[in-house]
Amino acid sequence: MNIVQNRKIFYSISSVLIIASFAALFVWGLNFGIDFKGGSLVEVEYVDERPEISVLQQSLSNIQTGELSIRPTGEKGYIVRTKELTENDRSSFIKAFGPADSFEVKRSDSVGPVLGKELQIKASFSIALVLIAIILFITFVFRKVSAPVASWKYGVTAIVALAHDVIIPVGVFAVLGQFYGTEIDSLFITALLVVLGFSIHDSIVVFDRVREHLRDLAEEKIKNKNAVDEPFEITVEKSVQETLSRSINTSLTTLLALVALYIFGPEATKNFSLALFVGITAGTYSSIFLGSTLLVTLEKWQNKNKK
Amino acid sequence: MNKFRITAILIILLGLGTGYFAYQNVNSPYKLGLDLNGGTHLVYQADISELAPEDVDSSMEALRDTIENRINVLGVAEPLIQTQVAQVGGDKVHKLIVELPGVTDIDKAIEIIGQTPILEFKTATTSSVGTSTEVGFISTGLTGRLLSRATLQFDSQTQAPIVGLQFNDEGKELFAKITQENVGNVIAIFLDGRVISAPVVNESILNGEAVISGGFTPAEARDLVQNLNYGALPVPVSLIGSQTVGASLGIDALNRSMFAGLIGLGIIMVFLIVWYRLPGVIAAVSLLFYVALNLAIFKLIPVTLTSTGLAAFILSIGMAVDANILIFERMKEEINKGLSMEQAIREGFNRAWTSIRDGNLSSIITAVILFWFATSALIKGFALVFVIGVLISMFTAITVSRTLLLAIAPKHYSFLFGHGLKK
């Protein structure tokens, strides 16, 4: 199948996904975890059968007024989220789960507003920083490639592809947050940053091939003045096709590792591996069907403007 | 050809040695983070509003030392106590981070670090409001921070326990000044905001010594002396975040991570061998080498492994194959162009190298920024393992895979690759 020629189909698929993601984001918003918004989380596991949620709700709300979310985990456990518990509240809160020997506290987290704020600031900074570093890096790596598309345009297309790869997992997590209570925590941000790195890696492999072909063509031209110009579209198509099995295989092995981590790995990294899975899948799609095809579109616009 | 075979054998032996080092867990165990080992992580915010800017660093240092001493006395194995400055909006937040492996009772942990007994000296003022007289207190700036030592004494006449205070030089001067200015007045001694003693100053005290006779029982007086000496934190702190992971959850996470890693490794190796045949076997061997080398480095640095670090490692196993795949795909193309086997291997490596280098550099940039972003041990653990993984994967792809391929480069192409070759 000719990828570059059919680029409009791929653009449409991506556009639909991006619009759906934005819609999910605006309609439902994101369900931020306590490490962002502050609060406390207690995970307990009962020795015998766990009490009904309503019973626990009753017992806990005597101690802690305000927002209280109780979700079952495993067969005998609950994860309870509340606003931040003070040191004094915590022990009476934990006593309200039942007699001391009937349950075990598996995990307890508490995040004050200062730490939440710090994370918010750092998260936005680091995403911005990664994006800037990547544009600069690509522009630098492809600085010697200027014809027919300027090197910074490789950077721009890469960023469009990156935005695509980040927006889609965000959209997926907005949906999951709405229906399954999946939270956006600092690990989700970590996953996004890794997806950025991975996806740019993929784009670089394709761009690198384009660069190599352009260099070969230029050499050919010097040797043989009468050589026919190869349309940029053909060069890109060739490059995408040649790197296709590599792109798919590399992503496949990475996705296999992530599936193993999701299915067999610990609870702590489940959502993390899911975010990576969605992001890397989107990243593979964009590096094959979006990044390089956008280069062709850019080149066509450029030519149109010249005429 | 023989040269490559000898190198290949050496590499395999080295790999086995590394693997053994990584596997045996007796002499040099892996360092596990709190989330795998169980333990408590506490974040305190230090209130530096009362400190002069130039004193902040030394006070934070003193705070760290005080808490370290106290934790050491209680015999927690390998605690981690560090100070950190975070920029939150326009404010600098001074944080003290305490990690207590094995301590899963958070209340006990908080107790270990303890509340700051805040000792303050205040002068009393009286003002009349209508018919009643109100007593107010004014801070003098003299606090427990300026104390050099507290001792348990007994009043020579009543035998009641009293607490003797010895100020440091700065405190001595301040105390002298306050007593001079307040002869005949009351100076109230506050402990944690409560008046414990309000003596009248008879004369100025220049030697920097004072006693508190607060009607203590001997036990109370002893506790106070201890708290003032060992507990009086140089800077007041408040708990702003905490995290506790029970030991069972940690072990479960560790076992599941290892299992997931093994399954992931197995599936990837099968995929490589089925898809790429002989080079696939080489990539699989090279991947085992990669795993062994990584684990050995985790031990040597040592890297504190967390659930996210292990996730990074599992992810990196999937990604490490990339360099091999790039090279193999390239080799196929070179063979199709009509190059000889050995030429194709060399060309494949050379031509794939720029992609490998540029692609991995982008991963390294991301990981470095991640490391900086890391507000928690979990993300730091991820970033560190990720960076190590990327670097080692580049190394093993260009050394191990390359040497092994050259060593067994077969004459018949069809044996080499399952498909993808033009016959």
Image: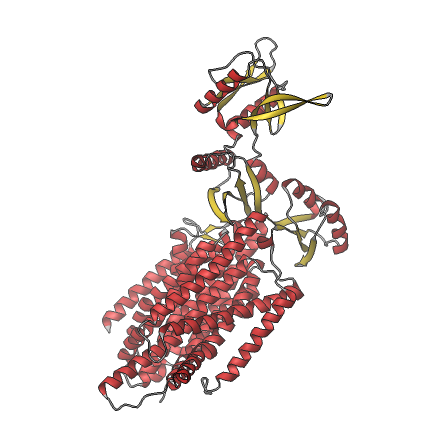
Q: Position of residue A35 (x, y in %)?
A: 57, 53
In the rendered view, would you say B254 is above or below A100? below
What kind of colouring is applied to the model shown?
Answer: secondary structure
Asked if residue A70 shows in the view, the reply is yes
Is residue B335 rendered to the left or right of residue A37? Answer: left
Q: Residue at x 33, y 67 (%)?
A: B400
Give the quarter of the image for residue B189.
top right
- How many numbered tags mark residues here? 0
Q: Position of residue B344 (x, y in %)?
A: 29, 79
Quadrant for the C terminus of chain A, please.
Answer: bottom left
Q: Nearer the viewer, residue A63 or B32?
A: A63
Q: Position of residue B186 (x, y in %)?
A: 60, 17
Q: Nearer the viewer, residue B160 or A235?
A: A235
Q: Position of residue A136 (x, y in %)?
A: 38, 66
Q: Nearer the viewer, residue B366 or B230?
A: B366
Q: Nearer the viewer, residue A255 or B267?
A: A255
Asked if residue A52 shows in the view, the reply is no
Q: Residue at x 70, y 52 (%)?
A: A67
Q: Residue at x 57, y 41 (%)?
A: B239
Residue sticking out furthest to the top: B157
Q: Residue at x 57, y 30 (%)?
A: B117
In the rendered view, would you say A68 is above or below B313? above
In the rendered view, would you say B332 is above or below B54? below
